[in-house]
Amino acid sequence: EKLTFPTLGCLCVAINSSLYHDPTDAAAEAQAHEAWLDATLRAAAASGDAKPVHTLLFGHIPPFLHDPSEPTGYFNWPAGVRRRVLDQLHASRANVHAWFCGHYHRNAGGWDGTLEVVTTAAVGTNLLSATHEGSDPLELSGIGGAALERRTSGFWVGGGRRPPDFHP
């Protein structure tokens, strides 16, 4: 579950983020995946005139939601793995500038140096944030319900203008 494709001077790299989040039952696959990512980044950085203007990463589970130093939780990667991979991306010189993720079913995002991590809401059901005492937005306790409504879907398909109650 990995993919690369070039488009418009950019290199798009889709990774299997589950192997970074919890490789417990897939240690060999996780190691092979990391070697593939490293080789992909090295090749991109060494491609001379064909070097991508931007390398864009795609993965389901974000490395972090808001801040690269946030604690480990259900919705992000373990802190040590996160830091190691973020450092690898910066050191690669492959122009990795953006990383697009899901998993959180809400919008989030942050920066690690020149790398922006964008976590997008779902096309369908989105999670609402909990407001009760003791809820943790990085954990399942941070879920306060679900919404499946046009105004919360994060995606609009339909001719013409967006309806006034559409707020991604």
Image (tube, rainbow, N blue to C red):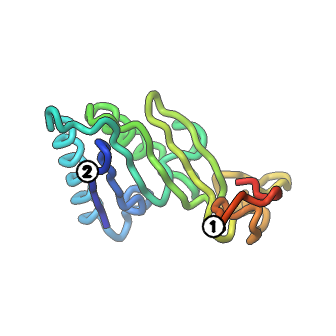
78 horizontally vs 138: left or right? left
What number of labels is visible? 2
Question: What residue appears at the point 78 percent right and 60 percent down from the top-left corner?
Answer: 163
Question: What residue appears at the point 40 percent right and 46 percent down from the top-left corner?
Answer: 81
Secondary structure type for disc 1: loop
Quadrant (top left, top right, bottom left, bottom right) of the C terminus: bottom right
9 horizontally vs 39: left or right? right
Counting residues from the N terminus, which is met first, the one under dot 1 or under dot 2? 2
Q: Nearer the viewer, residue 101 or 67?
A: 101
Quadrant (top left, top right, bottom left, bottom right) of the N terminus: bottom left
Q: Which residue is mark 1?
A: 157
Q: Nearer the viewer, residue 142 or 13?
A: 13
Q: Quadrant of residue 55?
A: top left
Image spot of residue 63 (x, y percent): 48, 48
Secondary structure type for disc 2: helix
Disc 2 packing (10 Å; few <14; some 14–19; many ≥20): many
Mark 1: amino acid: Val
Question: What residue appears at the point 52 percent right and 34 percent down from the top-left corner?
Answer: 111
Image spot of residue 124 (x, y percent): 65, 70
Q: Which residue is mark 2?
A: 37
Mark 2: amino acid: Leu
